[in-house]
Amino acid sequence: MCGTSGALVSHETVQYLRSEPYKEDLRLELFSLCMHPDCEMAYYSADYGYLTLQRELMTPIDFKTDASEKYACYCNKITIDDIRHAVLKEHASQIKDIFRFRGPIIVEKCKLNSPFGCSCIADINKMIEEIKQGKSGEL
């Protein structure tokens, strides 16, 4: 749609994230997550022509410009601002420090909850380091 390359995601992730009026059984195939921040497309599949727009999802895609929430961790609803606050105000230096502030942690459903279809732990660790180095904005 926008000409940007996508990141491969399983049909299970797309199926799970689609909101109720858009739920349908999707064929067993790989989808691509549109990586352009300004494109309204969320997922697409060249094989069967499936297109899923952001407004058809239950959860906003954090890097999209118009996302209502910017989640760093979808399973635990931890926002990017929560990470910044934990590092800059609470002096968190590792991911376990951030999770400690949040109570019980859910990690077994990353394939379904994350628009990327995978765990966010590596991204959160990278984000923590960038904030500590002053590369990721102030609160």
Image (cartoon, rainbow, N blue to C red):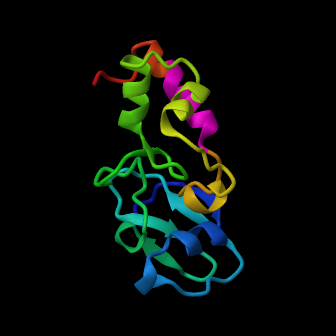
Asked if residue 45 can be seen in this view, the reply is: no
The N terminus - image quarter: bottom left
Q: Residue furthest front?
A: 103
- Which residue is pictured at 56% across the width and 59% down the height? 113
Q: Position of residue 71 (x, y in %)?
A: 43, 46
- Which residue is pictured at 44% across the width and 21% down the height? 87
Q: Position of residue 47 (x, y in %)?
A: 64, 78
Q: Answer with left or right where residue 39 lies relative to residue 10.
A: left
Q: Position of residue 29 (x, y in %)?
A: 70, 74
Q: Position of residue 25 (x, y in %)?
A: 61, 87
Residue 123 included in the magenta stretch of the image? yes
Asked if residue 12 can be seen in this view, the reply is: yes
Foreground: 57 or 108?
108
Where 27 falls versus 10 (above or below)? below
Where 63 falls versus 15 (above or below)? above
Q: Residue furthest top?
A: 133
The C terminus - image quarter: top left
- Which residue is pictured at 63% across the width and 58% down the height? 8
- Which residue is pictured at 65% across the width and 71% down the height? 12
Count of all numbered marks drawn on residues in the image? 0
Where 2 falls versus 23 (above or below)? above
Foreground: 99 or 5?
99
Foreground: 128 or 41?
128
**Main SS type for the magenta part?**
helix
Range of magenta residues: 120-129
Q: Quadrant of residue 46?
A: bottom right
Foreground: 103 or 134?
103
Residue 78 included in the magenta stretch of the image? no
Q: Answer with left or right where residue 67 lies relative to residue 58.
A: left
Where 39 falls versus 87 (above or below)? below
